[in-house]
Image (cartoon, grey):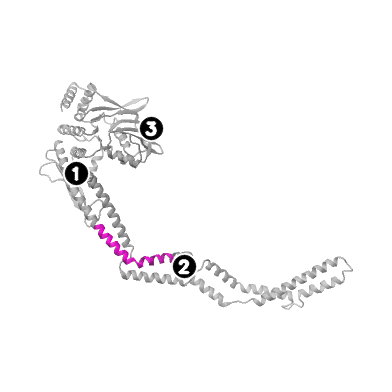
Amino acid sequence: MLERLFVQNFAVIKELSLELGPGLTVLSGETGAGKSIIVDAVSLLVGGRTSPDMIRSGCERALVQGVFRAYDANAANLLALHGLADEGELIITREITANRSTCRINGQSVTQGLLRQLGTQLVDIHGQHEHQSLFSPAAHQQLIDRFAGARAAELLTSLAGEVKAYEECERGLKSSPGDESERLRLLDLINHQLDEIDAAKLKPNEEDELKSERQALLSFERLRGAVERCHAELTGGGGRSKAICDVIGRNAADLKEMRRLSPALESISALLEQAGYLLQDAVQELSQLKESLYFDHGRLEEIEQRLEHLALLKRKYGRTLEAVLIFREEAKQSKERLHDAAERMAALKQSMTEQEKRYARLAGELSALRQEHGRELCRLAQENIRELGMNSGRLSIAFTPHKGVMNPRGAESMELLFSANLGEEPRPLAKIASGGEISRVMLALKAAFSKFDDIPTLVFDEIDSGVGGKAALAVAEKIAAVSAHKQVLCVSHLAQIAALSDHHLYVRKEDSEGRTTVSVEHLFDQGRVRELARMLGGRETAVALEHAEELLVKSRKR
């Protein structure tokens, strides 16, 4: 049960603190007074989405905090599962800033997903727009499955697992060859590719080495010409009369004989003599190199053919030789898979057959459960519908089998059908024209659920929309009946509902210091009579006040 609600800087609320009790609490006030903002604050406590737009203008943060007590074992187990302290009291805090929002349970930070999961065990909120959920067959299915209880949830989880496993097998089959002849054809192709790559005996860096050697062979003529030209000029070949070595040797000898005439000739003749020796060594090495130079036309042709073969492999299997080798590894793995493809395909088909059988068994059990609990839900809701003033109202469920498809939601879709009048065939709820009728159907379903689920708090935000006259009193009595075993918070414009409440809160907007804010007043005695009079007629006339007194007296006798 929600015992306390504290709201600060949220929408137009500056600061608000509410003490809430068991039974039926009605929030009334003029249209636009901020009643639904309080419902929005409760929604945040149970995992609702936040937005920076929720922060009161001019403030840096918004804060919503709620204290819950007397929650059920499911909530306690969830707290224990996530290591959260459980002292019989839950303090849930939501804080919103411009950049982020935080969730805390008993001071410990938690994810919004966990808070939303816990919130489903604490509060059931019927907002102003939830009527539209009754127009969706998908919502009807969730409604019936929820009513069917824990076993339905277990079956849905199992069905989803079977469908996922089946689809994985199906993908495995699609990635396998369709038949034996196709498998053999692919094996033959892969063997050819592997043989072609393996026959090439690729080596690391081979292509770069071959290109370097080819470049050297293509530059052979330039090398030989340079060697022969240098040898000829040094030895006197190529038409020269004397070898340079001989000229230097002769001049070195002449200067050496005349060194008595000039001391400087001693060092000059020594240098020339040393140069002659060096030149003779160079000529000898050039002669050896000249004799060893040989242009291998066959090697150049061999290199060109090898490079052309490597280029062919790259065109077929990859842009580089490394890519060709990667292709080889992948082809080898494909070959291994193809070798046992027949066995794997048979195993996949066997698994799919078993999954279909398990799915059929689980889906059949779920269908029977839906039929049983669907009928019970319709029976209970129909009783409530008639108590709500629609004596001829009939509620039923249309089951439509899914054809040839393993659906994780079960073997059929479901849609609630309703007829408000005798002689009319039940039709989809979306085709009900009256807002009052759809409101009462929603209340009838909620009332049917309230006897079976363990959620302690139920919030109705203007569920009385479109309801008036005798139907208003019937709606009020039904909400009051639900509040006998639930805490019910109800935003309402109906005096009939407010008169039956255990607690009456009046919500108003006030202007102060140039700002608008929301305040809440607990109404008692004459304050409550005056508000009922306003709700009945808009003004506190003597007749309205008398009517309000009478309505309040009658409600106390119920």
Q: Which residue is mark 3?
A: 57
Question: In the rendered structure, are the residues bearing label 3 and label 1 in contact, judged by CB atoms less than 8 Å apart?
Answer: no
Q: Amino acid at mark 3?
A: Ser
Q: Judge whether residue 258 can be spotted in this image.
A: yes
Report crowding for label 2: few under 14, some 14 to 19, many 20 or more residues within 10 A (C-alpha).
Answer: some
Q: Mark 3 or mark 1: which comes first in sequence? A: 3
Residue that mark 1 sits on: 429
Local secondary structure at mark 1: helix
Spot occupied by residue 316 in the image (x, y as percentages of width and height)? 44, 68
What residue is drawn where x is 41% and y is 64%? 330
What amino acid type is highlighted by mark number 1? Leu
- Which of label 2 and label 3 is nearer to you? 2
Question: How far is mark 2 from mark 3, CA to CA?
Answer: 67 Å
Residue at the spot 28% in from the left edge and 60% down from the top edge: 351
Q: Which residue is mark 2?
A: 314
In magenta stretch: residue 340: yes
Choose between 493 and 141: the one closer to the eye: 141
Q: Residue 490 in the image: x percent, y percent?
A: 24, 32
Magenta span: helix, strand or loop, mainly?
helix
Please check the rendered image and state whether residue 517 is part of the magenta-colored stretch, yes or no.
Answer: no
Say if 111 sits above or below 214 in the image: above
Q: CA distance from mark 3 to mark 1?
A: 41 Å
